[in-house]
Image: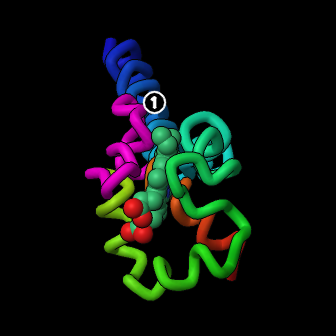
Amino acid sequence: MMKPLFTALIAAGAAMAFSVAAQAEADGEAVYNQACMACHMTGAAGAPIKGNKEAWEPRIEKGIDTLYEHSINGFNAMPPKGGNMSLSDEEVQAAVDFMVEAVE
Ligand code: HEC
């Protein structure tokens, strides 16, 4: 008699575990390719180019939290979340990490 409820609970638990894992492992490279590359590969509008140490060093010096904040809320010609408001904060941060790691 308890079995259907039990099965439903396990299914719900598995679904929750899955979405937590998906959040924790936001794929910075995929987000970059989708939402950041247009400017950060070409330097459009003065964007620091991915892999360009000189462009990134003074930015990294501001601290990673500032870079996260500027990417999420915008900074001069840098649009909030690269203009893609459907991205989660975690996804934007993963893309920042991806670009910062490229010059470290
Ligand atoms: C429409 C073009 C455009 C897109 C798309 C874009 N950026 Fe930018 N980004 C810029 C420009 C321009 C700057 C330089 C702003 C400045 O220093 O005045 C910048 C700066 C930055 C900085 C440095 C901020 C600082 O404080 O120095 C980070 C980090 C960053 N972008 C992350 C991202 C991420 C992550 C994405 C994708 C989710 C993204 N950008 C998408 C144009 C863009």
Residue at the limit of the structure toward the bottom, as seen here: 61
Instruction: From the image, tell me which residue sits under label 1.
Output: 15
Above/below status of 61 relative to 55: below
Residue 24 visible within the image: no
Viewer-proximal residue among 98 and 18: 98
In the displayed structure, 82 sits above or below 104; it is: above
Task: Give how far across and how far down residue 94 sits, in percent.
Answer: 52, 57
Q: Residue at x 54, y 56 (%)?
A: 47
Q: Which residue: 38% across, 13% down?
A: 4
Magenta-highlighted stretch: main secondary structure? loop
| Residue for point 34% across, 32% down | 85
Instruction: Choose between 98 and 48: the one closer to the eye.
Output: 48
Question: What residue range appears in magenta?
Answer: 73-90
Find numbered disc 1 in the image and state the secondary structure of the residue it sits on: helix
Quadrant of the snapshot with the C terminus = bottom right
Question: Is 63 on the left-hand or right-hand side of 50?
Answer: left
Amino acid type at circle 1 is: Ala
Point out residue 38 in the picture as x, y percentages from the top left corner: 62, 39
Question: Residue 30: where, in percent of width, then height?
Answer: 66, 41
Q: How is the image coloured?
A: rainbow
Q: Is residue 79 magenta?
A: yes
Judge from the rendering whether residue 59 lies leftward or rightward of residue 97; answer left or right. left
Residue at screen point 40% across, 50% down: 78
Q: From what the image shows, is residue 53 above or below residue 80?
A: below
Residue 34 higher or lower than 25, as above or below: above
Mark 1 neighbour class, 10 Å CA radius: few under 14, some 14 to 19, many 20 or more: few
Q: Does residue 86 show up?
A: yes
